[in-house]
């Protein structure tokens, strides 16, 4: 699985491994992970009916939940019905820890799964969640250049973190989009009220993140949008 974002999110995604056979906190828990990893919805429902915990955590990482596994498996041919089933059966749609590591919405953003993000948001997931590295779903979507994800998040209230900085780049969402010369993302963030004067972790405005020489029309247009001298 590619590393698409900051250390905390990448660590969660990269550390996932099959559940060991000697993991037996109850007779229902190993089968739950097996059902998710084998994409067997009928088995998932059956194990939940027998008392399986929809908030089960992975033995190798207590911040990684069964819901996160269901989201992750969508990149391997899994069904979104597994995600829907877990949410319907009471799975937490926010992180299970105070640091917000492993927040399902950040996982969905890291994997560019806008349809999953919408499900989580409709189920009242916090659109402005920040993990221990300062990553938020919005900044992750900007990092990935995923416009549908960013629009979904912003349309569901992620504007509270639009001007905050964080993650491995210590940039605001607008600053990161400017640095990447992502014109469409810059336009979207400005449409939803991103502040041109918001400072990031290095006390720089978004315009000051455009340190590369002007290389063409896109760079020129972004500089104009950010009120930078384009000459």
Image (cartoon, rainbow, N blue to C red):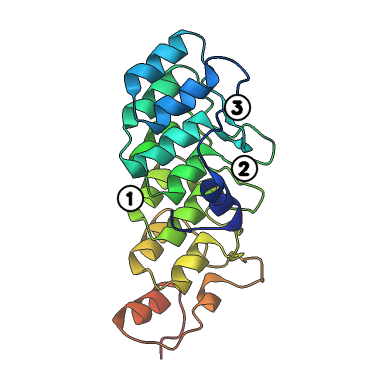
**Mark nearer the N terminus (2 vs 3):** 3
Which of the two residues, 137 or 28, is positioned nearer the viewer here? 28
Spatial CA distance of label 2 from label 1 is 23 Å
Q: Identify the image quadrant of residue 224.
A: bottom left
Residue 33 numbered mark, or none: none
Secondary structure at numbered mark 2: loop
Q: Identify the image quadrant of residue 198.
A: bottom right
Could you classify mark 3 by the number of other residues whose Cα lies within 10 Å: few (under 14), some (14-19), or many (20 or more)? few
Q: Is residue 199 above or below residue 97?
A: below
Secondary structure at numbered mark 3: loop
Q: Residue at x 35, y 55 (%)?
A: 147
Is 99 left, or right, of 95 in this rendering? right
- Determine the residue located farthest toward the right in the rendered image: 98
Could you classify mark 1 by the number of other residues whose Cα lies within 10 Å: few (under 14), some (14-19), or many (20 or more)? some
Q: For the residues labelled 2 and 3, say whether their Cβ atoms are less than 8 Å apart.
A: no
Is residue 123 at all visible to an observer of this figure? Answer: no
Residue 49 position, x and y percent, is: 44, 9
Kindly identify which residue carries mark 2. Answer: 101
Q: Nearer the viewer, mark 2 or mark 1?
A: 2
Secondary structure at numbered mark 1: helix
Residue 57 position, x and y percent, is: 59, 29
- Determine the residue located farthest toward the top in the rendered image: 50
Residue 187 position, x and y percent, is: 36, 63
Kindly identify which residue carries mark 3. Answer: 22
Is 66 left, or right, of 151 in this rendering? right
Q: Is residue 185 above or below residue 64?
A: below
Q: Nearer the viewer, mark 1 or mark 3?
A: 3
Residue 148 numbered mark, or none: 1
**Mark nearer the N terminus (2 vs 1):** 2
Which of the two residues, 56 or 114, is positioned nearer the viewer here? 56
Q: Residue at x 36, y 56 (%)?
A: 146
């Amino acid at each position: 699985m590619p590393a698409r974002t900051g250390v905390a999110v990448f660590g969660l995604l990269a550390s996932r491994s099959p559940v060991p056979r000697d993991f037996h906190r109850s007779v229902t828990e190993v089968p739950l992970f097996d059902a998710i990893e084998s994409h067997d919805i009928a088995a998932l429902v059956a194990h939940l009916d027998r008392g399986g915990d929809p908030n089960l955590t992975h033995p190798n990482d207590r911040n990684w939940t069964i819901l996160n596994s269901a989201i992750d498996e969508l990149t391997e041919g899994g069904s979104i019905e597994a995600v829907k089933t877990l949410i319907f059966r009471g799975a937490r749609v926010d992180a299970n820890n105070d640091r917000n590591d492993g927040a399902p919405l950040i996982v969905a953003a890291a994997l560019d799964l806008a349809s999953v993000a919408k499900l989580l948001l409709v189920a009242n997931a916090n659109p402005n969640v920040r993990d221990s590295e300062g990553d938020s779903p919005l900044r992750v979507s900007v990092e990935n250049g995923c416009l549908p994800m960013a629009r979904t998040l912003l349309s569901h209230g992620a504007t509270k973190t639009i001007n905050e900085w964080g993650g491995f780049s210590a940039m605001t969402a607008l600053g990161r989009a400017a640095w990447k010369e992502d014109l469409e993302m810059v336009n979207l963030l400005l449409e939803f009220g991103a502040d041109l004067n918001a400072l990031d972790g290095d006390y720089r405005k978004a315009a000051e993140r455009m340190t590369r020489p002007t290389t063409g029309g896109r760079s020129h247009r972004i500089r104009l949008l950010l009120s930078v001298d384009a000459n």
